[in-house]
């Protein structure tokens, strides 16, 4: 086995094509995972000086510093409250819209569907600034309602396009069979259509929740100093200290809920569900 570690032996053993594929794979893995490995290293580095490869001292010094901040627990609670509220409210408004786009034909349908791309077609900071002017006029600055609206604006594309594709993939014959058996339209929707479209809705829900957890610019601008989610608290703590390890610790804290949700919903996440939401029919 150790003889295969010799590049020349490995080249002759697998052939030129496989050897080049292996090199490309190794480069990709290094490019993709090296920042993550560097982040993990910094999070557990008590003392690190650039350009050293490894820390001078390992430990949990900066974890203690981060958890010693009084604003951390509050920011974690606020992040989860806002993310859950954003997800639930987005589902209430966007799923009926997605169903109408999937099942009914009416003038301006495609234009209406494409309009959800507008929030991603322009720089976010400019959009947030324009919205902040309106929010200031209506008293939404520094409120949970204003922050949740900002988070919903960022998630509407996913919450409409992905469920719309999921509803479109439910065959009408299955709904008609339920109606022929005596089920009402409402019962047919909740017993047949909604369960079959649930994988696409689950993916959209996941993206909405994770996007809300990671939103920082809009929260800082609209929430002012009254509402501090984890990303906002991270900005403040990192700027108050010159230690780069603090940012790495916060990054891991933000990744943990995302990784857990992705693991729980892994059977719903796939290229079919993602790409299916971007088909205009």
Image (spheres, rainbow, N blue to C red):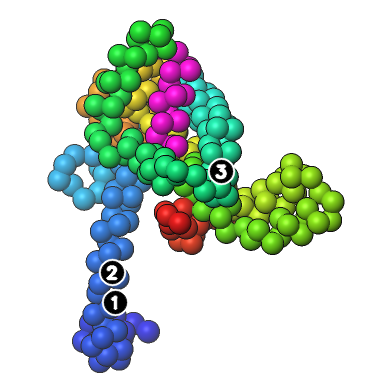
Q: Horizontal and vertical percent for residue 259?
A: 49, 47
Dot 3: few (<14), some (14–19), or many (≥20) neighbours within 10 Å? some
| Magenta range | 142-156
Label pair 2/3, CB-CB below 8 angstroms: no
The quadrant in which the C terminus is found is: bottom left
- Which residue is rendered at x = 41% and y = 7% of the image? 139
Label pair 1/2, CB-CB below 8 angstroms: yes
Give the residue at mark 1.
22
Q: Nearer the viewer, residue 217 or 131?
A: 131
The quadrant in which the N terminus is found is: bottom left
Could you give the CA–CA distance between mark 1 and mark 2, rounded to whole angstroms?
Answer: 6 Å
Which SS class for mark 3?
A: helix
Q: Horizontal and vertical percent for residue 270?
A: 49, 59
Give the residue at mark 3.
100
Is residue 145 a member of the stretch shown in magenta? Answer: yes
Which badge, 1 or 3, is on the more N-terminal residue?
A: 1
Question: From what the image shows, is residue 119 above or below residue 54?
Answer: above
- Which residue is rendered at x = 28% and y = 40% of the image? 121
Q: Nearer the viewer, mark 2 or mark 3?
A: 3
Which SS class for mark 2?
A: helix
- Which residue is rendered at x = 81% and y = 56% of the image? 180
Which badge, 2 or 3, is on the more N-terminal residue?
A: 2
- Residue 113's quadrant in the figure? top left
Dot 1: few (<14), some (14–19), or many (≥20) neighbours within 10 Å? some
Which SS class for mark 1?
A: helix
Q: Nearer the viewer, mark 1 or mark 3?
A: 3
Could you give the CA–CA distance between mark 1 and mark 3, rounded to whole angstroms?
Answer: 48 Å
Q: Nearer the viewer, residue 221 or 132?
A: 132
Q: Which secondary structure is most common in the magenta stretch?
A: helix
Residue 26 image label? 2
Q: Horizontal and vertical percent for residue 141?
A: 38, 12
- Residue 32's quadrant in the figure? bottom left
């Amino acid at each position: 086995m150790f003889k295969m570690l010799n590049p020349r032996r490995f080249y002759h053993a697998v052939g030129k094509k496989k050897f080049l594929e292996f090199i490309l794979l190794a480069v990709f893995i290094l490019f993709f995972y090296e920042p993550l490995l560097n982040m993990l290293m910094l999070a557990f580095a008590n003392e690190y000086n650039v350009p050293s490869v490894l820390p001078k001292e390992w430990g949990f010094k900066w974890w203690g510093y981060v958890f010693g901040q009084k604003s951390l627990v509050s920011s974690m609670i606020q992040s989860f409250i806002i993310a859950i509220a954003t997800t639930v409210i987005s589902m209430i408004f966007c799923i009926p819209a997605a169903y109408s786009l999937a099942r009914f034909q009416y003038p301006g349908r495609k234009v209406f569907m494409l309009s959800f791309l507008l929030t991603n077609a322009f720089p976010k900071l400019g959009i947030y600034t324009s919205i902040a002017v309106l929010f200031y006029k209506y008293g939404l600055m520094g409120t949970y309602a204003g922050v949740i609206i900002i988070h919903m604006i960022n998630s509407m594309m996913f919450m409409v396009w992905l469920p719309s594709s999921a509803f479109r993939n439910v065959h009408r014959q299955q709904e008609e069979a339920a109606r022929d058996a005596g089920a009402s339209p409402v019962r047919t929707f909740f017993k047949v259509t909604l369960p079959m479209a649930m994988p696409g809705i689950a993916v959209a829900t996941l993206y909405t929740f994770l996007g809300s957890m990671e939103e920082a610019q809009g929260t800082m601008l609209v929430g002012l100093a009254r509402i501090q989610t984890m990303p906002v608290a991270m900005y403040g703590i990192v700027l108050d200290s010159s230690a780069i390890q603090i940012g790495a610790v916060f990054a891991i804290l933000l990744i943990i809920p995302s990784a857990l949700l992705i693991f729980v919903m892994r059977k719903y996440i796939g290229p079919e569900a993602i790409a299916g939401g971007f088909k205009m029919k």
